[in-house]
Amino acid sequence: MSGISRRLPEQERSRLKSILKNLIPEEAGVIVRTSSEGATEEELERDVARLKAQWEDIFAKSESSGTSAPSLLYSEPDLTVRVIRDIFNEDFNKMSVQGDEAWDEINNYLGHIAPELTAKIEKWTGARDMFVENKIEEQLAKAFDRKVYLPSGGSLVIDRTEAMIVIDVNTGKFIGKGGNLEETVTKNNLEAAEEIARQLRLRDMGGIIVIDFIDMALESNRDQVLRRLVECLGRDRTKHQVAEVTSLGLVQMTRKRVGQGLIEAFSTTCESCGGRGIHIHSEPVRKVALDKDMDQRYVPSTQNDDLDEAESSDTVEVSEPAETVEPVEAVAPQAPAAGGRRRRRAVSTGVITPE
């Protein structure tokens, strides 16, 4: 029983089916993926022969094991071969390989699988390390950054949430020429569409992805940006789907999550903040609450002016809510009058007594 990818055109599916009908034994079956589109009969025959030999080797190991205990019959190839198998194809111009062991492994694999691609690989003979010479480490470090700069000065801001990945497009210092804002925004969005497709592959981001392009007034420009995004995603072998632009100008898409993304593979959750990226300061919270409570209790005095006037006069009243004031009369001596008699003037003072 064989299965052919439904993503292929019906005409191509029929062509592949007719070719494989003469190549596959009756007791066998194959799965034909989208990468088989356009493959010649010779290429398919070679691939079927390789798979058949691989299966016969697995079957022979199972027969010769001589034990009923579980044992390893077949395993996935190492990382080097997986990269060649999953990524390297005729679209590449050249692939440099450093190290004798890796060179032999890749050369032997391509010799059996795709001999036509062996001309595209070359052995690195430089004096310096290949990663240092081509600044691979520097580019890898940039792939962890939250912000990605565009050629014209705009930028992408990539944020991950529990539910989705959000990409925000900004113009930054890019203002264009001639003051045509619509043209400037459209150019920035076109650059962003190309870089987003690249970042999705580079960081291996999957799940729901929402892109907030800069608002464009013309519908033709919005369609142009969406077409550019879909066109650039055409190189992505990972299954993806782009939805229509929402009423808020957001582009929604999904990308199949194959394995760990770049960030997940090379990072751990922060133990201090739990992955939130923020710290809650508890002391200022208590201080604000205390200050607010003190503000409610404290009532500023509005009687200072009255007190100043009272100090300048002969009469002073002192009162408190919990106590009563009983007035008493005291006699203050005065200077003698013209007739030799002293004048007496009554002065009211306050005496505080408990209730």
Image (cartoon, helix red, strand yellow):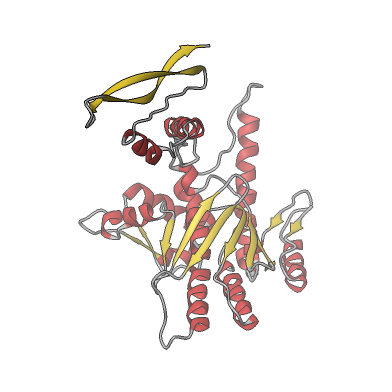
Side of 96 relative to 64 (left or right) = left
Of all residues, the one furthest to the front in this rendering is: 339
Side of 229 relative to 8 (left or right) = left
Q: Quadrant of residue 173?
A: bottom left
Residue situated in front as seen by the camera: 18 or 152: 152
Of all residues, the one furthest to the top in this rendering is: 354
Q: Position of residue 293 (x, y in %)?
A: 50, 31
Count of numbered tags? 0
Residue situated in front as seen by the camera: 79 or 193: 193
Q: Quadrant of residue 43?
A: bottom right
Q: Position of residue 227 (x, y in %)?
A: 61, 75
Q: Decide: is 92 above or below 309.
A: below
Residue situated in front as seen by the camera: 89 or 103: 89
Q: Residue at x 38, y 49 (%)?
A: 102
Q: Position of residue 110 (x, y in %)?
A: 48, 58
Q: Residue at x 52, y 73 (%)?
A: 189
Q: Residue at x 78, y 48 (%)?
A: 27
